[in-house]
Amino acid sequence: MATEPQFTRLERVVIGMSKAFIALGAVAALWAFLTLNFFSCCGVDASSYFDPTVSPLGYWPTVTLVWAAMGLFCILGEGIPDAVCAVVRRVRVLANKRWA
């Protein structure tokens, strides 16, 4: 039976920092994906909340929160029509089987 390796305090700190950087990279990639999705589907001219220079929320909250949230809403908005079509299609198939 193999024993667990014993790490020094410095090694544990380095391992913890590397895990933190990996998590930070994942969060940054997710934020970038949501922001790019917002700009690709919604644009920036829809409201003053999307322009950080005139937004009443301020520059950083607009960039970090509003853009990512709107990107998420764009993703959800793209999936909703497809889901509705799939449900309607399934109901039609079930109705045709029932009445046939």
Image (cartoon, rainbow, N blue to C red):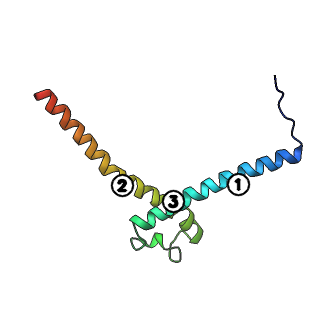
Query: Mark 1 or 3 closer to N-term?
Result: 1
Q: Position of residue 11 (x, y in %)?
A: 85, 46
Query: Mark 2 or 3 closer to N-term?
Result: 3
Q: Is residue 35 above or below residue 52?
A: above
Q: Distance between the residues labelled 1 and 3?
A: 18 Å
Q: What residue type is labelled 1?
A: Phe
| Label 1 with label 3: CB-CB less than 8 Å | no
Quarter of the figure that contains the C terminus:
top left
Residue receiving disc 2 = 78
Q: Where is residue 31 in the image (x, y as percent from the top left)?
A: 55, 59
Residue receiving disc 1 = 21
Q: How far apart are marks 2 and 3 (CA)?
A: 15 Å
Front-most of 26 and 77? 26
Residue at x 81% of width, y 50% of height = 14
Query: Mark 2 or 1 closer to N-term?
Result: 1
Label 2, residues with CA under 10 Å away: few <14, some 14-19, many ≥20: few
Quarter of the figure that contains the N terminus:
top right
Residue at x 16% of width, y 32% of height = 95
